[in-house]
Image: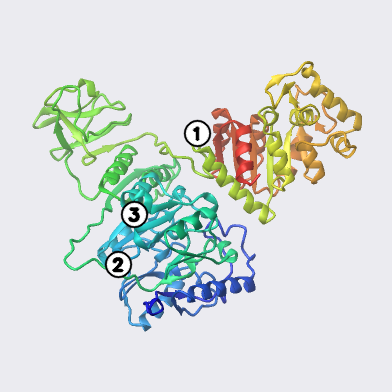
Amino acid sequence: MAGMARRDRFLLCMPRFYGIEYVINPWMEGNVGRTDAAEAMRQWEALHAALAAHAAIELLEPAAGLPDMPFTANAGLVHDDTFIPSRFRFPQRAPETPHAVEWFRRRGARIVELPGRGTFEGEGDALFQPGEPLLWGGYGVRTSLQADRHLAEILDVEVVPLRLIDERFYHLDTCFCPLPGGRVFYYPDAFDRESLERIGARVPAEQRFEVDVADALHFACNAIVTGGAVITSFASDALRERLERWGHEVVVCPLGQFVMAGGAAKCLALRLEHPGARRPAGAPRVASEVRERAVEVQGDLLDRGLMNALLDRITDGGGDFEIEAFQPGLRHDQASLARLRVLAPSPERLEAILAQLIEAGARVADEEHDARLEPVEQDGVAPRDFYSTTIFPTDVRVRGRWVRGARQRMDAVLVVDGAPGEPRVTCRLIRELRRGDLVVCGIDGVRTEPTHVPRAAEMFGFMTADASSERRVELTVERIAWEMRRLRERAGKIVVVASPVVIHTGGGSHLARLVHRGYVQALLGGNGLAAHDIEQALFGTSLGVDLKRGTSVQGGHRNHLVAINLVRAHGGIRQAVEAGAVQSGILYECVRHGVPFALAGSIRDDGPLPDTLVDLIAAQAEYARLIAGADMILMLASMLHSIGVGNMTPAGVRLICVDISPAVVTKLADRGSVESTGIVTDVGLFLNLLGAALGD
């Protein structure tokens, strides 16, 4: 009887013209032209066979010049007899849509395009919970939040917005997989905190499983769920055990050729029906929680970065935006004008985002309202929804007119008093409030005129110019390791700039292993790095301190001088390694694996070593030569050398600055390079974590 059960139906597209011909996600970077057409076809055919054993398959005819057409999940979303086509963010994929629309039109489907101009990338960002009228909607990278609201209205289902915050997981189906029975498995670090709370609010803990980073980076969540089977490109033992405990057959189909482009099993299959996804007749309609408001901002939006700061505040706040109009000033001394439509996944989140924008000088533009005033009910206690002031001049709309606040200051509230025809607005501290005072609440009827708009504070962002000692170092290290693995796979170039602190903090052995395993293509440092690296190789000490026990050894103060003397006796570091006098360490691995290094001298150098370039001009030239063609530069606890390297590095090179001093990290970030990442932590700990993340 089980064989007679209705089989799910999927749409696939043969990868006849598949290849990586452009870069629109991080996985494609460095992989243009690297796919193997024959191997890709073999992998797709294996997936086709595995899926055909559990479901019915229909085919979409591929088209020349559209290499991503095999990723049919992005073609659109199917619900009963309705097909909602995608509106791709990138123009390279836009020509795919007419082919999908024509396929569904020939089969009698009702074609419904989403209104507005927001982007929507189909089932990649819209996943039905099997058997329920519940749609998980991903936004933040490819699909706009506006699409979630429109899908709720068109399909009459509940849509739960989930914000994606890791550019590697640019579609929801790359990091989230709903299962029958109300279960899900997903990668939590791909989502912001509020999205994780939304998942937790709808799925009990025993019904959800969080995959680890190995599963996530191998696209285990990008799985096809059908006929009791979970078909995926990868499954760890832990994930496999959980899925089997939940009653699923786990079918693994390696899809490495497609992972190179940022997709796997689910991306290659569009589900053609969703049983149980219709809301029961008579059930109350679920209104979308997504809200939107229009705002306007005027000023020096480009030169001072105000526009970027505003957009950052929206996205950092968990919202989304559409630029409805932008009119730049005709000259640098003329103001620009922008009108934005701001969207948020809930009314509360929208209110919080708008408050941030008003602080930055934006004005709510839908219509002008007077400020909402609430009376103080207890001395020294403001109403719950009070507006909190900034240092910038603030106006409040009272009885149809704008009134400038007096005694402007930060972290105060706005009190409205005065005669009916002559209202006054005053900034007061909360402790100064008295019962009956009228306090401005909410964001309507408030505007500011900032003289400077800093970017909103963020959590750590990979490849940004921010720095903080309180960020999640482990997650950042994992992302850096991921990038380093990909660079090594495509023969990229990683340059390391290091100081003796690497040795002092116990990081020397970890850095040596990175060199040994091919993760370093050039090493830059000074005389001290090499001297103490060789000291450690000879004596196990650095500055005379036993690195295993953390205690000084008798006579250890001369160990680095003995090391320098030994190298000088052999004529150089390479000669000492080749003679067997030095048998471990960073410089040893550089010599053995042909990794070039440059040591720049300084006035405090002991010795120096014969390899140390004491001519400053020559040292700069050698540094520049070794930097040429670099894809990534790791700067490890070396302020002087790192700043020098930063000043001679062209744009487009990814800089990772690690230092225990925030000032050093900030100084590197202040170069203005959007490719720089600052990590405030102990460099030995960083190298230990990096080695572990790389499988040390």
Dot 3 amino acid type:
Pro
What residue is drawn where x is 69% and y is 24%?
549
Dot 2 amino acid type:
Ala
- The quadrant of the image that shows the C terminus is top right
- Placement of 53 over or under 216, stated as above or below: below
What residue is drawn where x is 37% and y is 34%?
451
Check disc 3 and report its element: helix, strand or loop: strand
Residue 277: numbered disc = 2
Sooner in the amino-acid sequence: mark 1 or mark 3? 3
Identify the residue at the far left of this view.
Answer: 420
Depth-wise, is mark 1 or mark 2 nearer the camera? 2
Q: Is residue 344 left or right of residue 674?
A: left
Sooner in the amino-acid sequence: mark 1 or mark 2? 2
Q: Marks 2 and 3, Cα distance to the nearest angstrom?
A: 17 Å
Instruction: Determine contact: label 2, label 3, CB under 8 Å.
Output: no
Q: Residue 295 location, x and y as percent? A: 29, 48
Residue 161: numbered disc = 3
Q: Marks 1 and 3, Cα distance to the nearest angstrom?
A: 29 Å
Check disc 2 and report its element: helix, strand or loop: loop
Badge 3 local density, few (<14 within 10 Å), some, or many (20+)? many
